[in-house]
Amino acid sequence: MDVKQRTARSLVSKLSSVSEQTRSEALSELRLTTKQDPDSRPIIAEAGAIPYLAETLYSSSHSSQENAAATLLNLTLSSREALMSTRGLLDALAHSLSHHSSTTSPLAVQSAAATLHSLLVVDSYRPIIGSKREIVYSLIDIIKSPNSPPRSVKDALKAMFGIALYPLNRSTLIDLGAVAPLFSLVLKDGRVGIVEDATAVIAQIAGCEESEAEFARFSGIGILIDLLDLATGCSPRIKENAVSALLNLVRCGGEHVAADVRDMAAVVVEGIKDVAENGGSKVPAWLQLPANSELLSKRYLI
């Protein structure tokens, strides 16, 4: 038997030991191995580590939680199918996230959210993860909690973005109260990276019928248009996300939304032109041409 296979089986067998110290040492070694040796990841997954790692997320030991969650995150780089086919994995991740303000270590919360973000790279997993309301609710609770560390907020936002990429999940995010904390981050959080991630989620959520009424409750259109005002000095990515959000709102919301945007068309048009001319590499090709940006403005916004 290959040395790596023997090592993996030995470490996994120790996860079921009655000795807490033995389990703890094995978890630490698995975390280090999956971080430093990419070839070991599928071997460790095949050796049966994932169910033990998922169970460890319920542990009261912060170090055990952190090592298990980090190892799961590392395994997503090569063994996403193995993770998603493990019974109870999503429930364990939901448990870890839902106790973010009490029994779960902040580092474990961050790794759990990052694990979801990595799994959500696969299109077919988005409806499955999005159907787990405890996961969605917990991610929203993390971003609205004033005591959440910045890294936890960023990882939660990235996971929410992955969930929102599946259109039918957007109404779930709205139903569970995502819009208010997202706009609160935009208005009150001065950290550019977090505002960029929040507006990226907003842009996705805007692409459903339910967004019109919910955005109206929090003056969403006005906030998005303010982000496009050249005087605000927002980053190119924030402006790109604001443009995408407004376009999605107009497309899904109909004439009422178009009329609201039309009232402030001057700011919107200049903002679109600025994004088209100065935006980053993520600007869609059809928006990079000034002539097209003017056509876009006339077609959808004016």
Image (cartoon, grey):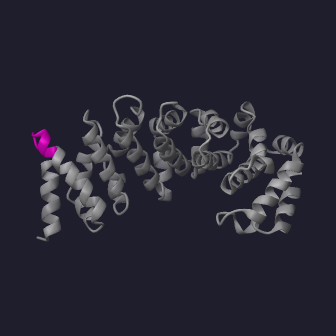
Q: Measuring from the top left, give residue 67's x and y in whole percent.
A: 27, 47
Q: Residue furthest bottom?
A: 2
Q: Measuring from the top left, give residue 167's x and y in whole percent.
A: 61, 50
Q: Measuring from the top left, give residue 236's x and y in whole percent.
A: 69, 57
Left or right: 87 in relation to 137: left
Residue stretch in magenta: 16-23
At x 45% / y 35%, what residue is drawn?
134
233 and 255: which is toward the camera: 233
Give above or below for 131 relative to 26.
above
Q: Residue furthest top?
A: 102
At x 85% / y 54%, what residue is drawn?
269
Q: Residue 43's image quarter?
A: bottom left
Give above or below for 114 relative to 43.
above
Q: Would you say residue 77 is visible in this rendering? A: yes
Give above or below for 180 relative to 266.
above
Look at the image and say whether residue 22 sits in the magenta stretch.
yes
Q: Residue 47's image quarter?
A: bottom left
What is the quadrant of the N terminus in the image?
bottom left
Left or right: 188 in relation to 270: left
Report how many numbered discs are placed on residues in the image.
Answer: 0
Q: Measuring from the top left, give residue 182's x and y in whole percent.
A: 62, 38
At x 73% / y 38%, what residue is drawn?
220
Give above or below for 178 relative to 278.
above
26 and 151: which is toward the camera: 151
At x 62% / y 45%, what residue is drawn?
195
Look at the image and say whether residue 231 sits in the magenta stretch.
no
Q: Would you say residue 45 is visible in this rendering? A: no
